[in-house]
C-alpha cells in the first residue's frame, strides 16, 4: 500500500485539491452552491452584475456598485462557463483549487509535506468563517498568495538578484487586487515592502531599480487597460467614483479610522513575521 510520503511524492494529491474545493464550497457556500437557493447577499449581487455585463451593460454607467470592476468581470468569466449561480460556483472551485495548491507550495518552505493538510484545514476553516466563497476577499487571495510564494522562493534560493519576471507578476497582481477592492492590497504592500527593504539591506541598488521599473510597468499596463476600457465607453469617472471615491465619501470618520488601524496592523504583522522568519533562517544556514 502506498504510504503518505510516496503519495505526495508522486503528486497524485494534485487531484485532491479540486475535489476538496468542490465539496467544501458545495456544502459551505450558501451564496453560490447549486444545492442552495439564490440569496440576496452581496455575493449574489456580484453574480447578477456579472450576468448584466454579459448582456451588454456597461458597469458603473448602466448599473452601479462600490466595488472594483475586476470583481464583477470575474463573475462574468464564471458565467461564460455556465450561466448564473452554477457558473460562479465552477469558477470559484477552480480559483480555490489553485489557491490550495499555492498554499501547499508556500507551506513546503516551512514544514514537511505530510503536515500540509494541517495548513489546508486551517485555511479552509478561516475561509468558512470569513466569507461565503464569492466575496471580494476570496477573489483577491490568489493574487496575494502568488507574490508571497515568489518572494519566499527568492529568499530561500539564496540568489542575490531578484528575478525581474517576479516583479512583473507582482505588478499585475497588485493592479488586479486594487481594482477588486483597494483595501485588500494592503497585504501585498507589506509583502513587497519586505522585498524592497531586503534588497536595500543587501545593497542591491541596480537590482532594486530594475525591479521597481518592471513592477511599475506591469502595474501601469493593467491599470491603463482597465481605465482605457471605461474611457472609451464614457464611464471612466463613474468607474473611479464606484471603485475608489464612493467609499471614502460615505464612510464615517470613526469606521474609517477603525478600518485603517486594522489594515495597518495587519500589514505590519505580515511584514514583521516574514522578515523575522527570514532573518532566523538565514542565521541558521550561515552557522
Image: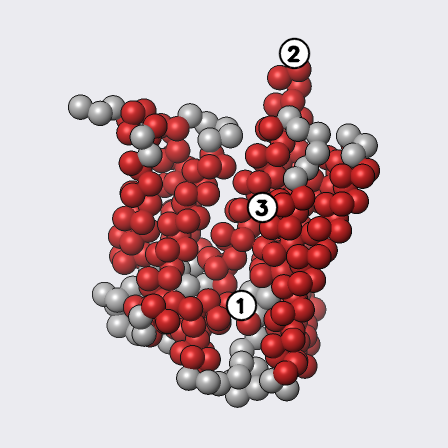
**Quick check: can you spot residue 195?**
yes
Among the 4 quarters of the image, the one containing residue 37: bottom left
Q: Residue at x 29, y 54 (%)?
A: 22
Q: Which mark is residue 229?
A: none
C-alpha gap between disc 1 and disc 3: 18 Å
Q: Does residue 120 lie above or below 4 as drawn?
A: below
Q: Which residue is mark 1?
A: 70
Q: Answer few, some or many: residues within 10 Å of disc 3's Cα (few below 14, many 20 plus, some between 14 and 19).
A: many
Q: What SS does tag 1 mark?
A: helix
Viewer-closest of 177 and 257: 177
The residue positioned 67% from the left and 44% from the top of the image is: 164
Q: Which of the image's four quarters has the N terminus? A: top left
Question: In the image shown, does 130 or 134 lie closer to the viewer?
Answer: 134
Compared to residue 133, the image places residue 287 above or below, namely: above
According to the image, label 2 marks what residue?
287
10 Å crowding of disc 1: few (<14), some (14-19), many (20+) = many
Q: Is residue 250 visible?
A: no
Cα gap from disc 1 to disc 2, whole angstroms: 47 Å
Task: Name the residue located 46 percent from the left edge and 31 percent from the top edge.
Answer: 108
Say which label, 2 or 3, has the lower sequence index.
3
- Residue tagged 3: 147
Where is residue 84 shown, x and y percent of the image?
33, 74
Amino acid at each position: 500500500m502506498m504510504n503518505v510520503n510516496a503519495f505526495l511524492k508522486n503528486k497524485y494529491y494534485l487531484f485532491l485539491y479540486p475535489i476538496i474545493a468542490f465539496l467544501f464550497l458545495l456544502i459551505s457556500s450558501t451564496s453560490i452552491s447549486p444545492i442552495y437557493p439564490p440569496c440576496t447577499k452581496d455575493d449574489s449581487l456580484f453574480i447578477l452584475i456579472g450576468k448584466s455585463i454579459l448582456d451588454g451593460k456597461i458597469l458603473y454607467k448602466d448599473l452601479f456598485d462600490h466595488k472594483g470592476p475586476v470583481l464583477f468581470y470575474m463573475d462574468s468569466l464564471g458565467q461564460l462557463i455556465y450561466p448564473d449561480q452554477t457558473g460562479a460556483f465552477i469558477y470559484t472551485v477552480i480559483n480555490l483549487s489553485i489557491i490550495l495548491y499555492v498554499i501547499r507550495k508556500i507551506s513546503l518552505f516551512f514544514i514537511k509535506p505530510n503536515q500540509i493538510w494541517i495548513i489546508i484545514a486551517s485555511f479552509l476553516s478561516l475561509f468558512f468563517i470569513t466569507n461565503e466563497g464569492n466575496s471580494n476577499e476570496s477573489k483577491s487571495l490568489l493574487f496575494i498568495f502568488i507574490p508571497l510564494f515568489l518572494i519566499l522562493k527568492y529568499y530561500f534560493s539564496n540568489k542575490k538578484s531578484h528575478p525581474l519576471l517576479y516583479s512583473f507578476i507582482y505588478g499585475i497582481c497588485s493592479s488586479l487586487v486594487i481594482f477588486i477592492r483597494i483595501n485588500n492590497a494592503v497585504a501585498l504592500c507589506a509583502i513587497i515592502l519586505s522585498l524592497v527593504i531586503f534588497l536595500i539591506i543587501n545593497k542591491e541598488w541596480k537590482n532594486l531599480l530594475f525591479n521597481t521599473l518592471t513592477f511599475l510597468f506591469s502595474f501601469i499596463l493593467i491599470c491603463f487597460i482597465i481605465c482605457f476600457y471605461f474611457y472609451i465607453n464614457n464611464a471612466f469617472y463613474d468607474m473611479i467614483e464606484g471603485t475608489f471615491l464612493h467609499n471614502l465619501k460615505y464612510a464615517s470618520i470613526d469606521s474609517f479610522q477603525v478600518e485603517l488601524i486594522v489594515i495597518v496592523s495587519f500589514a505590519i504583522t505580515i511584514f514583521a513575521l516574514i522578515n523575522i522568519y527570514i532573518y532566523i533562517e538565514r542565521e541558521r544556514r550561515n552557522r
